Amino acid sequence: MNFILKLIFISIWILPLASWAGLAAQEEEQEYPSDQVIEDSFQHLGLEGLLSIDVFRDAYRAFYETQDRKKSLLTIIDYSRPSTEKRFFVVDIESRQLKYHTYVSHGVNSGGKRAERFSNVVNSRKTSLGTFLTDDTYYGGNGYSLRLDGLTPGKNDKARERYIVVHGANYATESFIRQNGYLGRSWGCPALPPELARDIIDLIKEGSVIYAAA
């Protein structure tokens, strides 16, 4: 009987400790980089004046929250900036390199020069915000394109159903801006300059994070 009581007593103490250890391990895995690490990366990448530190911080954290990512690449789209500015950034988190910095279009029903309205609704022809994970490529009506999975419930989780993909477009160019005063607009897809689209798609495809903010 004493032996059984001892086992019960030990179990009472060990099981909570084991549970606590498991939770602690989970928290450690999901722990965000410190603000200082994020700010150092921001400065090292030379993003001052090009991108809001708040957007960069949110994107950086979204990157670490995305457990299914397979690459150290993070794409940031800052739709708070007008389409006449280069608001599409591809950074390598590990090497702290800015791989691409270019133009990107927003949805035709999101606004003119600026994106002001966003949606997750099929056929809305508006841009979606939130965290995306890149998947595979295909050739479609817009040429070489990259499928995206929306990871933010209620904001972009209908990306597949809406056919929101990364692709190149002749209206996403500097020459179009000179002629019209702003970029042309898509049906909700982040459209890139055609001369860069394939290289960017091939770099970020199959498991990298895209974070779109406004």
Image: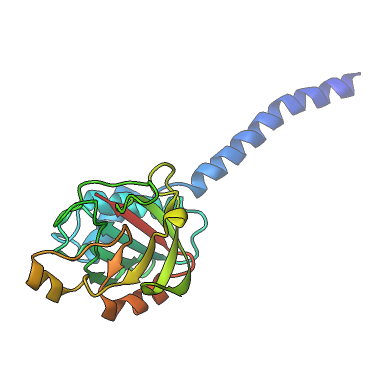
Q: What percent of the width, then of the height, locates residue 36? A: 28, 51
Asked where in the image residue 212 lies, by quadrant, the reply is bottom left
Asked where in the image residue 89 lies, by quadrant, the reply is bottom left
Above or below for 20 versus 58: above
Above or below for 33 versus 48: above
Question: How is the rendered protein coloured?
Answer: rainbow
| 97 on left or right of 7 | left
For the residue pair 24 and 53, the one nearer the viewer reads as 53
Q: What percent of the width, then of the height, locates residue 211? A: 34, 55
Q: Residue at x 88, y 24 (%)?
A: 3
For the residue pair 10 and 157, the one nearer the viewer reads as 157
For the residue pair 123 and 194, the one nearer the viewer reads as 123
Q: Is residue 33 among what the camera can see? A: no
For the residue pair 3 and 86, the one nearer the viewer reads as 86
Q: Is residue 8 among what the camera can see? A: yes
Q: Which residue is drawn at 60% across and 34% down?
A: 20
Q: Residue furthest right?
A: 1
- State how many labels appear: 0
Above or below for 161 versus 98: above
Q: In which quarter of the image is the N terminus?
A: top right
Q: What percent of the width, then of the height, locates residue 39? A: 25, 54
Q: Residue at x 30, y 48 (%)?
A: 35
Q: What percent of the width, then of the height, locates residue 21? A: 60, 39
